Structure formats: C-alpha cells, structure tokens
Image (cartoon, helix red, strand yellow):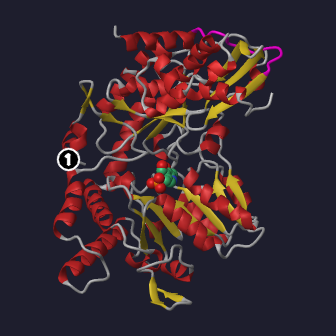
Amino acid sequence: MKSVELIKQDFPILGRTFNGHGMVYLDNAATTQKPLAVIEAISDYYENYNSNVHRGVYRLSEESTDRYEKSRENIASFVSSETAGLVFVRNATEALNLLAYSLGHRLKRGDIILLSEMEHHSNIVPWQFLMEKGVKLDYVKMTSDYTLDRDDYANKLKKKPKIVSITQASNVLGTINPVKEMATEAHEAGSTFIVDGAQSVPHMPVDFHAIGCDFLVFSGHKMLGPMGIGCLAGNLESLESMDPFLGGGDMIREVQYERATWNDVPYKFEAGTPNVAGAIGLSAAANYLRDLGMEEVRGHEKTLMKKTLDLSRDVEDLVSFGPPDPEMRGGVFSFNIGNLPFFKLNDKLEENDVVISGTVHPHDLAASLDSFGIMIRSGHHCAMPLMGRLDVAATSRASYYVYNSLEDVKNLFAHLNEARKVFAR
Amino acid sequence: MSQEDINAEVILDHYRNPHNHGRLANPTFSITEYNPVCGDTVHMEILASNGEISDIRFVGTGCSISQGSASFLTDLVKGKSIPGVMELTPGVYLRELGLNLGPAREKCALLSLNAVRKAISGNSQK
Ligand SMILES: Cc1ncc(COP(=O)(O)O)c(C=O)c1O
C-alpha cells in the first residue's frame, strides 16, 4: 500500500486544522472522508453528464445511463457479485429495510428471524416491524471474548429460522464474524442468510460468492464514497422471486390504472430517479480502494489495532470491549476510562455522596480530545441492546481507516491523560 | 481566564463536588430523566411547600456537563417559587450557565432542567 503520508494528501479535508492542531479523524465507523478522486468524479458528472437515466433517447441521457450502469458493474465486481444482482439504495439501512419488507411478506406467524446480540439498530429495528404479524426474533449470544457463540448459533438454527441476518464486522467491538461458515450452517437449516457488510466491505476483501450468502448490504459513505448511496447485493434468483419495496417510476414494466407489472432486477427495486452521481462517486471510491489493495487495507488496520492494544495496556483503569486478537478484529476500539454502568436508582438509595472511581465520561473524553483536533465517537453507537449486554451506559470509540497513521494512534493515547486530569471523577 | 473559562471551572467543580446530591425522605415530586443518546441520567427529588421548592436533591450518572449542571440547578431553584422555576426556560438557564456548548452538549446541560420542569408541572408520578 502506498504510504499513509501520500494517502493523506489525497484527502483535502485532512488539511484542516482545529485550534492549530492537525486533523486526526478517528470516527471512520460512522463515516469516512472522501479522496479528491471521488469528489472530482461527482463534479465531473454534474459538469458534463447530468441528465436522467433510463429515459431519454438523446445522447446525454445515454451517457449518463452508461456511467450509472458502469458504476454498478464496477461495484459489483468489487464485492464479486453479479451486476444484475446489485441494487442501488441509499445506505445499508435502506437495504435492510428493503429485505425486511420484501422477504417479510412471505413470513407467517411463528416464523423466526435469527440476529445476533452485536447488531446495529439497522439490523434489528426493520425486523422488529415484522413482529406485528407474529414473527419472532431470536439473537445469537456473545461469548466473554466478544465473539459469537457458535454452539448457541447451532442450537438456534435447530429452530429453523426463516432468515438469519448477521453483521460481518461489529461497529462497536470490531469483532469479525465467520460469516462464510455461518452461511453454510444457515443454508443447511434452510434459512436465508444476510450479511451486514457496512463495517466489512470498506475494510477487508469481501467476496459475495465466496461467502455464499443470499444478500450482502453496505453503505458507500463508510468506504470513501458519498453519502446517500449504498448497495444491496443479492443472488438473482432470490431477487427475482421477491416483491418490490417502493413503487414508482423505473421499477415498472407496464402500468395500467388498476395494476402494474415489475421491471427486471435490479430495476424492480430502484423506484424513482436514482442517485446517479452517488453511484459514480462510489465507483470511484471502489477504484481508489482497489488501487490500495483490500488485503493491504486490512493489514494496515491490523497494524494500527496492534499498536492500539499495546498502548492501551499502559493506561490505568482502561476498560476495552472487543476480541483481544487483532486477527479477529477490525479497526474499531471501544473503551472507557473507569467503569460506566447504567444508572440504577436502587443502587443509589443509600448513597448520599459521589463515589470517586476515576471514571472519565465518554462525552468529556471526546470533548477533551476534540480540543486537540482528535475526533472520536462517544455514546451507544446505534447498538443500545449491545450496550445493555455489556452493562455500559456509553463508550468512547476510535475507528481507523486508510489515512490513519501510527502517529494518529499515539496522538490519541498521548492525550488521554489530559482528559483524565480534568474530568476524572 | 475568560468569563466562559471561569464558568466552565464552576461547572466542573459542581461535577466533582456536587451540591444537594442524594435523596429526600418524602419528596413531593420525583422524576428520572434519561438521554438515550449518551445514557446520561438524572433522578431529581423535590420537596415543595407553600408553593416553593423547599428542598431538592439529585442522583445520576453522566458527563461533567449533565451532572455539573444538575448540581448547579439545584442551588439555583432551591427556595424559588414554583412559578419562578417555570420562568426558568431553557434559554434563560443556558445563559445562567454561561457555557459555550454545541447543540449536543446543550442537551446534556438541559437534562436536569427538563426533569425539574416536568416534575413540577405534574407530568410525573411520585
Ligand atoms: C454494522 C452496521 N450496520 C449498519 C449500519 C448502518 O449504516 P447506514 O447508516 O449507512 O445505513 C452501520 C452504520 O453505523 C453499521 O455500523
């Protein structure tokens, strides 16, 4: 992979300073910065090709359509899925809602959907909508080393869930789940297997066919692409058999006043004018990542995580959440200084004084680091059930990407103590 | 040091050594308010007599702003009449605090005020 110093130069925003400090952006699990190549691909589209797709017969519309479809082909090849099975949506969340809606149509009272304890709200709430029709949700348990309990998984598959939907990499713990093996087991149980790739496709080689899943979802903005574009990769047969999600233009073959028939996949799932510039921007992002090499991207993040785990051992009272082995973990580091359990009123009945435990609240930590230009996330990271499972009200989280250096990691740790000095209680 | 820095120090001091921390034997109102985004929680207990807040206590967990502000607020409203407390709108209260807060941290600062206003306007059970 080219050097991080050179990579940083490709990202105009990283030249910003805050209070005289260079920008150390460590919230990549939330969203990522955009290289010039992506920004230019988007402005090039608006400067030279803008027109609606799949409609006009004039040349400009054909050019626009051509660029949109070439982007689809390029992104499908990035995750080794079929071009016709790649549906453009707004983000991973929309893809999961599409699946919950369209696959949910067929479910009946008592049918089970199997998720895991470490899912993002996006892979929980859309499935909860189906509980209204009597569908049940079940969750694969997590072990004490923050990986999924495979025995529990095997047992829960015995109940023959209709759908299994699991994240390939956790946005809180960094845990990389063995989705290939899990897909095989799910198929043996007759289940449809969905992979939430929001935190994996940006950070490691992901091969749709090699995993053997039925669907894979991911978001463009978490992989150097623009906001407002994401993908659902699915196998063609499944997509063809599914009902559409949204109705409108582009998704139809023929419309009468009383009824309509559907276009072929992927268009059946792309109602209305699509985010053409978004698709083109995401395609440019895929090219940028392909040039770096996804094995190299993964290797780089492993190096950063090793350094992180090393440095974290020397921080007093630091509690972190995630597998200790960087081989099983993406570049996500959730931690607290001191313990931060949920508020329980009854624990406080007798207590009239504040217990001094040296805890620094994640909000205070993030605000303190911000004054040095270091940006980390604090809160529940859209995984409230997981926070409950960890019995922690909130965590701080640093998450890495291609433009983060070992220096950035050292910077983070160098400034933890200043937060402790001011905010520990 | 600017006035803002001084105010920030005051709130930090409240955070480290909170005033009116704990619980009351027979509160007239009690309420627990929670910010789901960060888990910040305050539980306020209020003793009202003759139309004024004669005593107030709180417990909670959260960041320096949410807990420091809760302590600051208890000092501010103790002895005030109930209508007087209702005049303490979020805007007025934030000016009292005098901190330079973004919208996310303003929520932390307002958690305890919202709790008190809700409690005394009858939107809570004892
Ligand atoms: C594991 C996981 N799934 C799904 C999502 C949802 O992504 P988006 O908000 O782009 O739809 C996220 C985003 O944080 C995530 O981390």
Task: Count all numbered tags in the image, as a single digit.
Answer: 1
Image quadrant assignment for residue B33: top right
Q: Which residue is labeled 1 in the image?
A: A10
Q: Is residue A384 left or right of residue A55?
A: right
The x and y percentages for residue A339 are: 60, 24
Q: Residue shown at 39%/65% (left/top)?
A: A79
Q: Quadrant of residue A272?
A: bottom left
Location of the C terminus of chain A by quadrant is top right
Observer-nearest of B63 and A326? B63
Chain ID, mark 1:
A
Left or right: A283 with respect to B13?
left
The location of residue B80, given as percent across then percent down, is 65, 13
Q: Nearer the viewer, residue A101 or A341?
A: A101
**Residue A281 position (above or below residue A65):** above
Camera sees residue A198: no
**Residue visible at 61% across and 29% down in the picture:** B114
Q: Is residue B78 magenta?
A: no
Q: Amino acid at mark 1?
A: Asp
Magenta span: predominant SS is loop
Task: Residue at 58%, 51% (x, y): give it.
Answer: A119
Mark 1, residues whose alpha carbon is within 10 Å: few (<14), some, or many (≥20)?
A: some
Residues in magenta, as a range: B17-28
Q: Is residue A135 above or below residue B125?
A: below
Label 1 CB less than 8 angstroms from ligand 1: no
> Which residue is at 55% across, 19% downward?
B69
Q: Is A213 positioned to the left or the right of A219 in the image?
A: right
Nearer to me, B120 or A313: B120
Give x and y (percent) for residue A338.
57, 21
Whether residue B25 is in magenta: the answer is: yes
Q: Is residue A391 visible?
A: yes
* Residue with the most extreme left position: A48
Q: Position of residue A97 (x, y in %)?
A: 55, 64
